[in-house]
Every structure is written in C-alpha cells, then in structure tokens.
Amino acid sequence: MDKDDLIVRFAGEGGQGVVTSAEGLAQAATQTGYNAQTFATFPSQILGGPTWTQTRISVNPVLSSGDELDVLVCFNEQAYMNHSESLSDDGVIVYNSAEFELTDNDSAIGIDFDELAKSTGNTRAANMVVIGALAELVSMKQAILDEFVTKKFTRGRPNDQEIIDSNIKAMGLGRTEVKQRGISIGQLNPSKKPDYEQVLMNGNLAISLGAMHAGVDFFAGYPISPATPILLFMEKNLPAKGKFVFQVSSEIESITALVGAGFAGAKAMTSTAGPGLSLMSEGLGLAWMAEIPLVVVNVQRGGPATGLPTKTEQSDLMSTMFPAHGDIRLPVIAPGSVEECFHGAVTAVNWAERYQGPVILMSEMALSERNQNLRKPDLSKIPVEKRQVNLDSNGYQRYDQSGVSPMPIPGGPGSYVANGSEHDGIGDTTHLAERHVQMTHRRWNKIKVLEDGDFEADAVDSPIALVPWGGTKGPAREAYDKLIKSGTDIGWLYTMFINPLPPDMLTQLRQKELVIVPELNYQGQFSMVLRSMGVNAISITQYTGLPFKVKDLVERVTEQIESYKQGNK
C-alpha cells in the first residue's frame, strides 16, 4: 500500500542518538523534496533520562508531528513499555536487540544497532543503521540516503570519504536486517520536489537568522532553557565591526544592557524563558516609559518557577503582554511555525524601531527544538526598518508630540534624557496630572502604528471560528481541515500578531457567535484577552508539557460546538 505520510518515533535515553536519528531522517527526506517536521522532548538533566523524538515525513506540507505511529524505534525496553500504545494497528517496532528481546510480536524487528555500527569501523554510526532500516520499511531509494550522507559529511577533512563510506555501509546493514524479516509498511510515494530552494532548521535558528537580517547589532543574554541556542548562535555569528555580543551574569543585567544599547541607537535584542522574563519586568517598564526600542525573545516552557524547563507550554501570554506595573501593554508576536519564527523575528525588530519601544517575540519549547523545512527566504523582498532619528536643534522636545516622533541619540542634537519617571516634553521629571494623562495617551497611541499585521481567514461566514495562537497553529489547522471535510460548520482565523491584533481580524472575531481557542495553558489566557476585547471566546486547554494531538482537538472542538448548540436551543 502506497503512503503519503510516515510517522516515526525514536525513544530511549538521552545520549543514545535518539535526537540525531530523528534529525538525520528529516534531513535525508527534505533534501529530495519531502516535507518534514520533528518534535523532541527530554528531561532536564544534562545526560540520560527518558528521551523521545518524532519525525513526520510527507509528500504534502506537514502541519503537526502526527498522532499514531507507523514505526516505533526503541533504544531500550523502557521506551517500548512507555510508547508501544502509540503505535497504529499496522505499525512496526524496530528495537535494539542488545538491550532487550520481543519474542511474541510478529511486527517487531530486533537489530543490534551498536554491533552493526562497530562492524563498519565507525562506532558512531548506530543511528545510520536505524535510518537504513527505516528506509527499507518504506522502500525509500538508497540514492536518497547516499546523497544525504555525502552532503552531511563532506567537510573538507582528510577522512571525509572514509566517514561517508562507513555511514553508507551502516545504512546498508540496517536495510539488510529488515529485508531478512520480510516486513514492510507500504511504499512512501515519490516526493514532489518544489521549484524553489528549501532549508531545514529549528525555531531558535530561524529567530537568530531573522534578527540578524533585521540588523540587530547588540545582543546580551543569559543561558536558560530552551532559549540558550539563540545566545550561542549570536556569540558565534554576530560579532563584527560595529556589533556586540555578551553573555551577562543575570537577566536583570541583560535587560538593563539592552535599555542602554537602545538608548544609544543600537538595535538591541536578548533571548530568555519565563523565569528570566520575570526578572526583566522592571527593565521592560523602563523601556516602555522612556520609549527605548529593544526586543526580548521569550521561549516559553512549563512553569511557574523552574517548572518544566524542557517541556512546551503557552502560559506566558499575560506576563509578556503585561510585564510591569502600571498601564502597560507590550506588543507581542507569537510565531506558529518555524518559518514564522524567521519572519516574526524580522518584524519584532522592525516594530521596536518603528514605534520606539520594547517588543516581545514569544516562541515556545516545541518550536525552538522543532526542525521543519521551509522555503529559503528571498532577503531582498523582506524590508528592514530603522527608527526615526532627530536631526533638529537642541530645542527639540521628543515627548511633546502625540505619536511616534524622531528619537534623539546621544552625541546628536536634541535632549536625549531617558527618564523612567513621568516626564514632560523634553524628558524632565514632572508629577503634574495633565502631563501624566498626556504621556499615557502618547505611549498607548504609538501602538497604532503596528496595526499592519496580516492574518489568515477561512470560511468567514461561519458563526463559529477556530482561533489558535503560537505553536498550536499546526495541529489546530490539521484538525480544522478534518472538521471541514466532515461537514462541520466552522471558520478559521489566525495571526501571529497577538498585540496589537490586526483591526480587521478583531472586527471579524467580535461578529462571531463563538470563538474556540486551543492553547497550552491552564487558564485559557488568549481567550481571556479576547473576551476583554469584546469577543465571545472560550478555550480548549492542555498543560501536559506536550503539543496537542490532532485527533484530540477534533473531538474537543466538536464537543464545544455541540455544547454551544445545546445551550442555544
């Protein structure tokens, strides 16, 4: 039976090659035109602990990592015990026979991964044995794997060819093991290679590249999961003439460094997670009050406190939108895919420059670790904005205007006081009531210049709409497509621009009888925000540290619709 889709889960202990195997399979598939998406979840210790990853390969665009498994690869017995129930009825188990035995399962293939790798002379090729076995299960051509290995290990070293040959041999051994069992799960249909160049990357890398394209020239950060890879990338790739990267001693130092850099005219950015964002509260309030451009990337994880540092969640919306005391509501962009991580980072920097204030780019653990293929962006078509800089005389009063006004930069003309106290037009402290009213209106009115975000809309005449946000977009869209196929009357609205929402989208939301919001938190935070804006929104929540399954969303959306209809009879 031919297949458009292949879902494989790799499960074992951290350090056994679980993540490497998943990423290798995705890389091999996308190089020849297949679409792929990976998902990884692991404990918070440095090495060891139960880890699993999932790779979905398809001839069609991949929206989620998938529900039921075609293949379960078990690196140890505990992995089999924990994950075998996720296997589809006709699924196959590939397991490490050096660790345990399955004697009563006709759909199980035992392979000694490590021993076969050693026989090639490359002890690190165990994951290639696994990839070869998987390729044989779906009749994937060896030429695809050969191309993948050749590209991956051609690095200009004297022993490149030796490494390439040993890895190809390891894949061949994995193929042979499956051939001898005579087991297949159906042939994967040929890929439809696009006529444009694709790249495979994760969300953290996409954010880093987007920020660099947008012209970030100052980065200060403190290591924290799951945002650390952004800091490490910047340390390695951003330094150049006129650019600065520094690993600071705390998130408080990070945000104050950004305030100083933005005040001096730099495009400044940091990356953190929920606990770090909490420490940045006062600094973000200062940047809002003094109107200083900067970007904070918040890669969400389970909380509160240390919480679930390596699990995914969408529970920071309130703390990102309202991070400080007083009247404040920060611009928030929440990408829903790896591709949106890139474009969201560009827009976050542009927004900060345009409205001259702090912007939050809100990712999440599942996006940060997810590898996904995307169209290589044409950078010449992605605009980069710069702030308005004051060039007038020293009598210029930046804050005495109703909207965004040119910003004085130290060393240039005009007053460049950055005051966290309420201030007058030139920036001097004042406690006059009329000044506080004037400046409050000024700060809030500036956000209107950011109301240019786009949004997706489908079946707009339906009285009910499904409205996900962030990384829940993919599973929700797949669930929506299934609901539409089954005849359910429901519409779709989505944007990564959480605040401010695109005005036309908000208008449509207010006209809906019911808006259903799937989100990974306990409180239903986005539906709370929407209700405060006059939208009849309710949430479908999950807080397991894992993404939604599509089948669960279909069931729960259907239940919400039926419950709503019953209540309105």
Image (cartoon, rainbow, N blue to C red):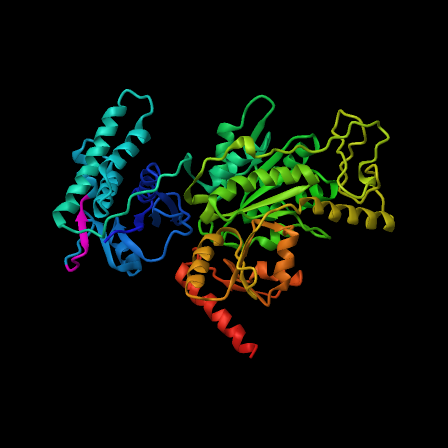
Q: Is residue 461 left or right of residue 33?
A: right
Between 249 and 369, the residue placed more toward the observer is 369
Between 481 and 277, the residue placed more toward the observer is 481
Q: Position of residue 314 (x, y in %)?
A: 52, 54
Q: Is residue 131 left or right of residue 549?
A: left
Task: Point out the stretch of residues depicted in magenta.
Answer: 104-112
- Let me know if residue 106 is in the magenta part: yes
Q: Residue furthest bottom?
A: 569
Q: Residue at x 82, y 50 (%)?
A: 437
Q: Quadrant of the C terminus?
A: bottom right
Q: Residue at x 47, y 61 (%)?
A: 542
Q: How many marks?
A: 0
Q: Is residue 420 visible?
A: yes
Q: Position of residue 203 (x, y in %)?
A: 47, 42
- Let me know if residue 488 is in the magenta part: no
Q: Residue 395 is drawn in which quadrant?
A: top right
Reply above or below: 326 against 163.
below
Reply above or below: 200 against 237.
below
Q: Position of residue 122 (x, y in %)?
A: 22, 32
